[in-house]
Image (cartoon, rainbow, N blue to C red):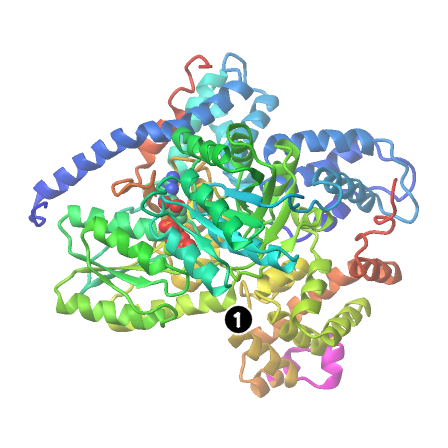
Amino acid sequence: MPAAPEPGGGAALEAASRERRWWGRVTGRLDRAGQAFAAQIRERLPLGRGLDDEFYDALTDVLIASDCGVAVAEGLVEGLRVRARAKGLRQAADAVAALQAEMAQSLVTRPRELRLVGAPAVCLVVGVNGVGKTTTVGKLAHRLVQDGRRPLIAAADTYRAAATEQLRVWAQRAGVEMVAHRPGADPGAVLFDAITAARARDRDVVLVDTAGRLHTRQNLMAELGKLVRVAARQVEGGPQEVLLVLDATTGGNALSQARTFQEVAAVTGLVLTKLDGSARGGGLLQIEAALDLPVKLVGVGEALDDLGAFDPQAFLEALFRGVGEPAAT
Amino acid sequence: MFDSLTDRLTAAFRRFTAKGALTEADVDAGLREVRLALLEADVQYKVARDFIARIRSRAVGVEVLQSLTPGQQVIKLVHDELVQLLGGETTRLTYQPRPPTVILLLGLQGAGKTTTTVKLALLARREGHRPLCVAADLQRPAAVEQLRVLATAQEVPLVGPSPDTRTPAAVAARGVREAERLGCDVVLVDSAGRLHLDEPLLEELRAVRAAVPVGTAVLVVDAMTGQEAVNVATAFRDQVGVDGVILTKLDSDARGGAALSMRAAAGLPILLCGVGERPQDLEPFHPDRMARRILGMGDVVTLVERAQAQVDREGAAQMEERMMAGRLTLDDFIAQLRQLRQLGSLESVLDMVPGGRALLRGGGAAVPDEGQLRHMEAMVLAMTPAERRRPEIIDASRRRRIAAGSGTTPPEVSRLVKGFAQMQGMMRSLGGARGRRQLAGMLRGGGLLPGWDRPGR
Ligand SMILES: Nc1nc2c(ncn2[C@@H]2O[C@H](COP(=O)(O)OP(=O)(O)OP(=O)(O)O)[C@@H](O)[C@H]2O)c(=O)[nH]1
Ligand SMILES: [Mg+2]
């Protein structure tokens, strides 16, 4: 068990180096995405050539193939044209390097830390069906324990069959207590009890797993709104975090999901899951740009510590690694 | 974002008359819009590119019939080609002549395999079979329990892991033996979600195939999947073997370009669609409707069918009549909204109505919720009959009166009126008497445009 966080730089430094180690470990998995991106660039954009309309069109396609969406892809390429002209770039390879800078700029430094200060802090984990909410709650509980926090898990998905059993396994893995009711119970009541229990047992974070709901389902979205209000009533400044979980394999619909959830539940940050499986993730550029929401965490697998803080720099490096290298088979 | 490809193409072709032949430049201008529509619907960029190339060669030089605008003509081409690519006619799930029929469900994590397993069991039973479910997802915590709860609720027998069956292959084999013992002729095997890149887990699926005679391997694919869809489909197809696809979560507002990737790039037929979380929420796949959805052209046929299945038939007939009448009044509008709400999410329903999106946007909010709907209704009730018939007469003073009478504000009133006018415009742009005939044809299950349902070209 790690010691409680000490005030001052020690804990922060340790956390930072843990984060770096984590990225070092998972970067291999992101490499699949990187390889796919690099392969795309190599296949479609012979780097020896010059910069013409054909180059820019092909580059737009590559970005669209990464799920950036048409608008963001065209925006990035337009920005690149301007940059290339201003800097007098002639070679495709230089333009691709400039693209990385262009993308880094679009991932402008947004605050990406979790803000979990409250008595207790309430963190709702929301999203459409099957994106990885329950798994994220389990992994996040583990992360917080490692940071010396004292989380409690609330099983507010009372709808899906065996959702509570699934979450219980994760709570045990993370060594964290869980508050649950019977199937079909009111999720608001679960949250209320969890907050009460957290106070009684001196827990400082309540992690709330919620039922998967399509953003197009009006009544379920209304129920989520209610959950937010319970958190607001019970805890000052609550809910401290509303994390929207998005599946990196999702295409343009992710934007629609984010927009609706933001409206109903005042989302504070995004969790991008299944980045280990997707050659994409371009969607995050689109959503960050359109909705001004930061990706705070990324999921890269199904094990307890396969969740990390999102580091745009490391992510882009993984994406562009190998772009300039000769094609592997 | 856009509402209707039809509108965009109409704009792109506005420059020239409805006479003569389309030139290459005309066609390219129009096809740019089609390409964007496909990409925005998550059609894989290569699939979109090949598709456009095929259309282009067909569209150049096409005689523009006098009865059609060029925009409609190109859309007709695009639509026909898309329906063709999506599978021509409806493909069905088949059962083995000699039992048992073993159906294996596989796919990425979170695609909806477990729910779909039970949906298929219900479908098999409806079609006169005796299903049995096998819980072979030994990976995800409580996955077995989830299937057990769902299957038990439907009184479908279930076989899960036991102390001496600890691998998916062994569980599946025991499931087939149990099916024989219990007299079940359809065995549905749920498997763990896995990445198409995960070689050891793909090997596990091959072991299942080796252990039991899989009649149909079904790839379960989330309709919201993006550009990765083609890789997913081809990897599972090549590494494990796949016979068909079930597309899930189509009750979302996903445009479903992944469907095209499945069919056109991976050559897999789409068997069925999941349209909700309940076990009965499984529908046949209709290429023509999917084509319209991908193109963002609305799917009034499905809408009417759902209406017929879930509301009363009379209500559906009335709705059809109102739409065909070509001129909705505000009264109709509210009545329709009320009725539509019973069909599922309002937004997904409005997506199926041409111009439905514009209505939502004009209404200000993304989706009117129950409260807003009540407000809208209150505003309509506070209007005079003349105002309801001809909302364009509502001026500032009438707005103030309506707002006061309904407990709302003048801006809310004008938002309602504006949204309504937009929708009406959409309806009208379908074009006078001809448009109404088209709509009538569409409602009867034909194409959206004249001649669409005629075989051949
Ligand atoms: N490869 C991979 N799989 C993941 C990741 N996160 C979650 N999963 C898997 O995705 C599947 C669905 O995850 P859940 O956590 O059950 O998703 P959920 O959003 O809670 O699902 P519902 O409650 O049913 O809506 C499970 O099989 C998880 O193991 C990830 O980062 N990578
Ligand atoms: Mg869950």
Q: Quadrant of residue B78?
A: top right
- Whether residue B361 is visible to the viewer of this picture, yes or no, is no
Residue at x 13%, y 50% (from the top left corner): A148
Seen in the picture, residue B363 relative to B400 is either above or below; the reply is above
Q: Quadrant of residue B207?
A: top left
Side of B70 where A244 appears, left or right: left
User: Residue B252: x percent and y percent?
Assistant: 55, 55
Residue at x 74%, y 75% (from the top left corner): B329
Seen in the picture, residue A201 relative to A174 is either above or below; the reply is below
- Whether residue B196 is visible to the viewer of this picture, yes or no, is yes
Residue at x 93%, y 46% (from the top left corner): B66
Tell me which segment is drawn in magenta.
Answer: B383-400
Q: Main secondary structure of the magenta part?
A: helix
Q: Which residue is mark 1?
A: B369
Side of B279 where A127 appears, left or right: left
Q: Nearer the viewer, residue B71 or A221?
A: A221
